Amino acid sequence: MKTNKQIILVSRPKGMPTIENYRFVETTLPEVNESQVRVRTLYLSVDPYMRGRMNEGKSYVPPFKLEEVIAGGAVGQVEESRHENFKAGDFVSGQWGWQQYTVTDGAKLFKIDPDRAPLTAALGVLGMTGLTAYFGLLDIGKPQSGETVVVSGAAGAVGMVVGQIAKIYGCRVVGIAGSDEKISYLKAELGFDECVNYKKSGLPKALADACPKGVDIYFDNVGGSVSDVVMQLINKGARIPLCGQISLYNQEKPDTGPRVQNQLLINSALMQGFIVGNYAPRFQEGVSQLAQWLAAKQIRYTETVIAGFENTPKAFLGLFSGENTGKALVKVSDPK
Ligand SMILES: NC(=O)c1ccc[n+]([C@@H]2O[C@H](COP(=O)([O-])OP(=O)(O)OC[C@H]3O[C@@H](n4cnc5c(N)ncnc54)[C@H](OP(=O)(O)O)[C@@H]3O)[C@@H](O)[C@H]2O)c1
């Protein structure tokens, strides 16, 4: 009998989550029945949206249930298969979440071609976060050559892809991130034109200097006071793909900042929230294009990989203090 280590949610966080909100449990894995597979987790994805699912209340996906395994993106390898579409050794991705194994009917598994890109790309640049950048920027932002694109959370999984796609489209790209190391990386390695460290004082002036022609597209990953500053710089006809609001996810009370409506009104600007899942029928298109850009080295990426299943909650919490550059992942086991 194989055992399976899992992480379950035991209480709903108030403000910033703590390790006490989670519990490690060990269960016995069921046998693999006819038409089932057993998958061993190689990598787990930790993502800011998971914070929202730890709360009660209405959102675009139901909240996590207490005493259940925390669901989320994962990459794994099939260890045993009694399913005609999978064989032992296949690499797959899915949403089985924070556990070392899953036994499943395979309906929600996607095969990964290990020759196309490193396995972890399926959780990042060729997965959920890459697709978020692709559809949010192109479908809502509609970048035109010569325009100025500002992206917050620029050194994160979504942000770094947004900036590079905007460069491919001929835009001037300005990133906002939380450390000088991240800023150097974005400029030196990924070709961002300018970057601003929002943790230093003087953000309004630094950003205005970085955007002498104003802002045509603001890809908002963070919300809060950073976005308040960017909104003051938008141009007539600006587009604002509203992707994430990480600065607000741990707030216990609703935040009131400068209201944006007047800026939208006087600039005839569009602000549109979106969820990557809205684009599910077009995922193939997005993955093929991203894979082409990746192969042509027009898009590069980095990852922050924390080793050890037991470090999953720590890796998740690190998202809120900016410990990751690029996609945040947990390495659980090695491929065979
Ligand atoms: N709409 C969708 O379908 C969709 C899909 C995926 C992701 N998202 C959203 O997109 C955003 C980025 O996601 P991601 O997966 O790429 O995460 P990520 O950017 O890789 O990681 C989170 C980053 O956010 C920054 N951050 C944390 N707290 C902050 C604060 N208070 N103010 C400003 N920045 C803060 C940190 O970088 P610094 O060092 O720069 O602070 C951290 O590294 C999140 O808001 C997420 O919820 C939306």
Image: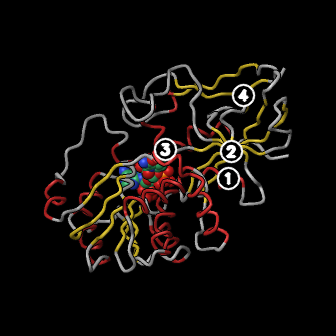
**Please, is residue 95 above or below residue 271 in the view?**
above
**Dot in front, 3 or 2:** 3
Q: Is the shortest distance between ligand 1 and the CB of mark 4 under 8 Å?
A: no
Among numbered discs 3 and 1, the one appearing first in the sequence:
1
Cα separation, mark 2 vs mark 4, equals 17 Å
Q: Local crowd at mark 4 within 10 Å, few (<14), some, or many (≥20)?
A: some
- x and y percentages locating residue 308 in the rendered image: 69, 42
Residue 231 appears left or right of 199: left
Three-letter amino acid code of the residue under disc 1: Thr
List the residue tagged with mark 2: 43
Identify the residue at horizontal 53%, vertical 47% (top origin): 281
**Please, is residue 12 above or below residue 122 in the view?**
above
Residue 300 appears left or right of 30: left
Among numbered discs 2 and 4, the one appearing first in the sequence:
2
Q: Which numbered dot is residue 104? A: 4
Cα separation, mark 3 vs mark 4, equals 22 Å
Indicate the secondary structure of the residue bearing disc 4.
strand
Q: Which numbered dot is residue 277? A: 3
Three-letter amino acid code of the residue under disc 4: Thr
Indicate the secondary structure of the residue bearing disc 1.
helix
List the residue tagged with mark 1: 120
- Return the residue nearer the eye: 15 or 157: 157
Cα separation, mark 4 vs mark 1, equals 21 Å
Identify the residue at horizontal 73%, vertical 49% (top origin): 112
Identify the residue at horizontal 53%, vertical 77% (top origin): 188
